[in-house]
Image: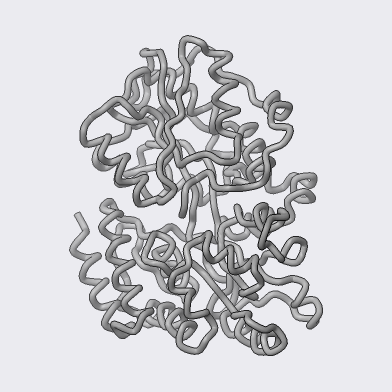
Amino acid sequence: MRAIERRLLPCTAVTAALTLVGGCGPSTTSDEGGADAKERGPITFVSGKNTSGTVPKLIDRWNDRHPDEKVTFIGLPEDSDEQRAKLIRNAKLKADTYTVLTLDVVWTAEFAANRWIDEIPESSFPFDKTLGPINGTVKYRDELFAMPYASDGAMLYYRKDLLEKADIEPPETWDEMREVCDKILPKQKGMSCYGGQFEKSEGLTVNFSEAVNSAGGQVTDAQGNPHLDTPEAKRGLDNLIKGFRDGTMPENGITYNEESGRGDFEKERLLFYRNWPYQYGVSNTKAKGNKVVDKFGVAPIPGEKGTGASSLGGHNLALSASARNKATALDFMRYMTSEEGARLRLTKATQAPVFAKLYDDPKLAEDFPWLPVLKKSIVGAEPRPRVVRYGDATEAIQQETHAALTGKKSSAAALESLQKELEALKP
């Protein structure tokens, strides 16, 4: 995934909406968990660069109400791999520059295992109010190390106008999608069938994992054991390879990240595009080069025999083990992960909430018609590889998958190498 805050809907009426979100008072934290619940004072909040305007407004409101415990925002690079590198560098230096960390959900185990983040009190967050799979991303060895901040699930963006004109429903399988493309594309000059994220980056790990899971396999089990020597894993990877070889995917699709692929979808160069929910607000906003406003819809991603399995995305908030003023940090984390804050980020930044209640709100479903699809995506989502050395694992997945997609290796050879590499990463 890219940075948690992307270029999204224009932020309007944010100040009024902030009245929904109150500041926290004095801490009532017990001594359970590993965080120091007494020290108070200024802290920092570290995340991908914010462009929607919601996070600065939330921080300003906190600072107005907590003049002695002010929060300073530190923006990290857009690329998630660069974000992770900077966070790890700070942790290894045991610097107190970073206090509250925004972590991709797949980083929690790695940061907890290395004791770069503190265990936090079980009472810190209302876990009974979230969509179930989300809660599995904040623990390591059954201990709590983070609070759910935002979720993410894959959705299939499609040209609703073209499918309706042909009287065709959105496809549920890869084969159905190819059939739809065979019917529609002959009349659409310069348009390809499907795109995802296939450049050598975290997006490739996500798309590879979805292909394997959607074919009935799994990259790793809950204990981190790889299962890539299976027929299901091979069929998943072969589906991607076939897509590039038979023209289902455009040649330049191997270079797609979230944004470059979105750009081609908006330029009417793709009939279908797999992406995160943030795209809905962007693609439905008038802008130079965007030709798909009010022309697209969303559906679950396709699978081998039915709806596919999304990779579970999202971000958690964690507390740096080397930080100061941890009592303030815990209160600020509760404030940022509140249901009211999640509602604000949804309505002003189309950021996927973690609270089940917001997906079932009729008014929100009317304003954000993609919410029911996203809920289905998250509920049926599978974690990305569950390994402590996630950075090494995702690098290996990217290298071997890219080699297979570009014809440098067969799917069998790539999966054999990847099985051995992931086995070697086990503790």
User: What residue is drawn where x is 41% and y is 16%?
Assistant: 42
Is the image coloured rainbow, by chain, by secondary structure, or in one colour? one colour
> Horizontal placement of 73 versus 109: left or right?
right
> Residue 340, how many percent across, how many down?
65, 32
Q: Residue furthest top?
A: 68
Q: Quadrant of residue 296?
A: bottom right
Figure label count:
0
Q: Is residue 324 above or below residue 340?
A: above
> Horizontal placement of 120 versus 268: left or right?
left
Q: Nearer the viewer, residue 86 or 357?
A: 86
> Residue 14, how many percent across, how many down?
69, 31
> Horizontal placement of 86 versus 202: left or right?
left
> Residue 175, how many percent across, how many down?
58, 85
> Residue 95, how many percent across, how many down?
26, 28
Q: Is residue 277 above or below residue 176?
A: above
> Horizontal placement of 158 versus 411: left or right?
right
Q: Is residue 77 above or below residue 381?
A: above
Dividing the image into 4 quarters, which one contains the C terminus?
bottom left
Q: Is residue 280 shown to the viewer in this render?
A: yes
User: What residue is drawn where x is 79% and y is 76%?
Assistant: 164
Q: Is residue 360 above or below residue 18?
A: below
Q: Is residue 352 shown to the viewer in this render?
A: no
User: What residue is drawn where x is 26% and y is 42%?
Assistant: 113
Q: Quadrant of residue 138?
A: top left
Q: Nearer the viewer, residue 37 or 72?
A: 72
